[in-house]
Image (cartoon, rainbow, N blue to C red):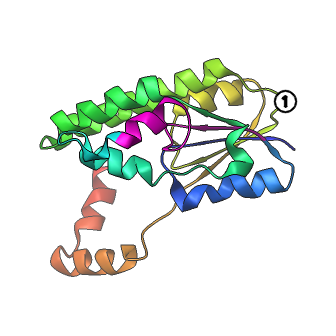
Amino acid sequence: MKFIVAQVGARRGYAVPVILQKAGMLERFYTDIAGNIGTSAVFSAAWVLPLVGESARRLVGRRLPFDIRAKTTTFPAITLPHVFRRVIIARDPAAACREDVRFSDALGRAMARRGFGNATHMYSMLGECGPLFAEGKRRGLIVISEIYLALSTERILTEERKEFPGWEGFAILDS
């Protein structure tokens, strides 16, 4: 079993690719950007500049563990313009959502172009980078996508059911 892991951000401190690497099961790790390799390391040094400060500060925290660096590919040419577009449209939730979907699609296509090596499986959190996984599935790879919910979900649902009694029943009738 050999895995391609694709993730946006440093979720869980890159635990999934690190665990797979230690088990000898990591084929490739694709991520948007990291603060300690390539051109991204230069950008992360810009944390003191006014307009890019916050984004660069977050990037500084994305430190790829040494064990997975050799198998990691980042995509700063796609990610950095996305970050700047998000800053410009930050106050427009609909535009931000469209930009995030566009970014995930562009990132997934770029990852697919980088290839699959000897991978037999693919792993993603939240179904990001869809084109990569569509191509992997077309090639016969086993696709694993983890979806997780906030611990507060049940509490929020309980509050909404009290606030809007019967709304779930209407949704079923409308189907």
In-front residue for pair 68/138: 68
Q: Residues within 10 Å of mark 1 (few under 14, many from 20)?
A: few
Q: Choose top left, top right, bottom left or bottom right for residue 31.
A: top right
Q: What amino acid is labelled 1 in the image?
A: Asn
Look at the picture and state if 54 lies above or below 2.
below
The x, y position of residue 118, in whole percent, is: 84, 30
Magenta-span inclusion, residue 32: yes
Q: Residue 1: x percent and y percent?
A: 87, 44
Q: Secondary structure at mark 1?
A: loop
Identify the residue under disc 1.
Answer: 118
Q: Is residue 168 shown left or right of residue 154?
A: left
**Residue drawn 13% across and 40% down?**
92
Of 12 and 133, the residue lying toward us: 12
Asked if residue 53 lies left or right of residue 114, the reply is left
Query: What are the residue bounds of the magenta stretch?
Result: 27-45
User: Residue 154's spot in the image, x, y percent?
Assistant: 38, 78
Q: Is residue 90 on the magenta stretch? A: no
